[in-house]
Amino acid sequence: MQLIVTEDYREMSQKAAQIVADQIRNKPDAVIGFATGSTPLGLYAELIGMYDRGELDFSRITTFNLDEYVGLSREHPQSYYRFMWENLFSKINVQNERIHFPPGIFTDAEAVCSRYEEEIAEAGGIDLQILGIGTNGHIGFNEPDETYTLATHVVELAEETIEANARFFHDKAEVPRRAITMGVKSIMNARSILLLANGKSKAEAVSHICTGVVDPKVPASILQLHPHVTLLVDREAARLIEMKGEAAWSHSR
Ligand code: GLP
């Protein structure tokens, strides 16, 4: 695992954009896993800037998003589809037919979950998965639990997640109680992973990724078992990290 600690959110976003841009330049038809939430917004703004300046071409990439709220259509103002469309996809030259999301509205959960995994496999797997992290250590919507759920699945959201995400809705009662998310297997199958975190509220969750202990109660801790993870965090999110455990570290500023 490589740990990069930046001075602030801006530097984190710029370094993240560099990593994503390198991936796309090395492999123009790369498969990129995208994440929602406020954390990657700075990264997405940087990528849009690169596209506007003619520095990066997204025309051949394929995208898979991590998750979607159950019950929200693509058009819903708070759907993750709409979030990605407004904050990135409508502003770069990604091809519409290469954009993939788990659906928010469906009748047969099992069928749509296994179809999503098939689509990832048919695309050749994910080259670079971008992740944020919940204050409770969730990745995608893999919530703390007694065991890990490997496959794409429908999940009951934790109260802490509903509270944290209520800021995007008019009121907390509007936040969907369930979501559909890639499981940890799809995430861990990505050839490389870039996890972003900023701010004090993420410090505790981030510190758990660096202890050497894998615990499904802090879902992101499984990333320690992946051979190519970059943990790109600002100074505030890094403040509780203790360098211990068996994780192989290369630490840069
Ligand atoms: C949501 C998403 C996650 C995201 C997390 C953190 O619940 N499902 O993918 O990482 O929130 O969000 P934020 O970046 O807004 O703190």
Image (tube, grey):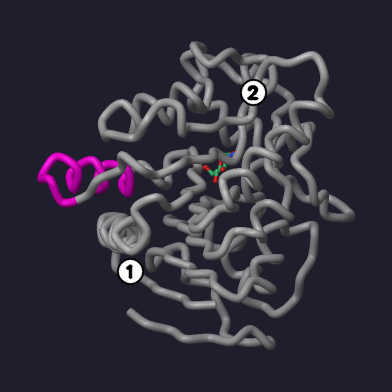
Callout 2: few (<14), some (14-19), or many (20+) C-alpha neighbours within 10 Å? many
The N terminus is located in which quarter?
bottom right
The C terminus is located in which quarter?
bottom left
Image coords of residue 192 (percent x, y): 52, 65
| Residue at (89% x, 54% y) in the render | 146
Q: Nearer the viewer, residue 33 or 170?
A: 33
Examine the image and state in which quarter residue 159 appears: top right
Callout 1: few (<14), some (14-19), or many (20+) C-alpha neighbours within 10 Å? many
Residue type of the residue flagged with mark 2: Pro
Q: Nearer the viewer, residue 188 or 230?
A: 188
Question: Magenta segment, which residues?
Answer: 42-55
Residue type of the residue flagged with mark 1: Thr
| Residue at (51% x, 47% y) in the render | 33
Magenta stretch, main secondary structure class = helix
Which residue reaches farthest right?
146
Find disc 1 in the rendering and name its residue. 6
Task: Tell me the distance, in whole angstroms, between the alpha carbons under discs 2 and 1.
Answer: 35 Å
Closer mark to the observer between disc 2 and disc 1? 2
| Residue at (47% x, 86% y) in the render | 250
Image coords of residue 190 (percent x, y): 59, 59
| Residue at (26% x, 30% y) in the render | 91
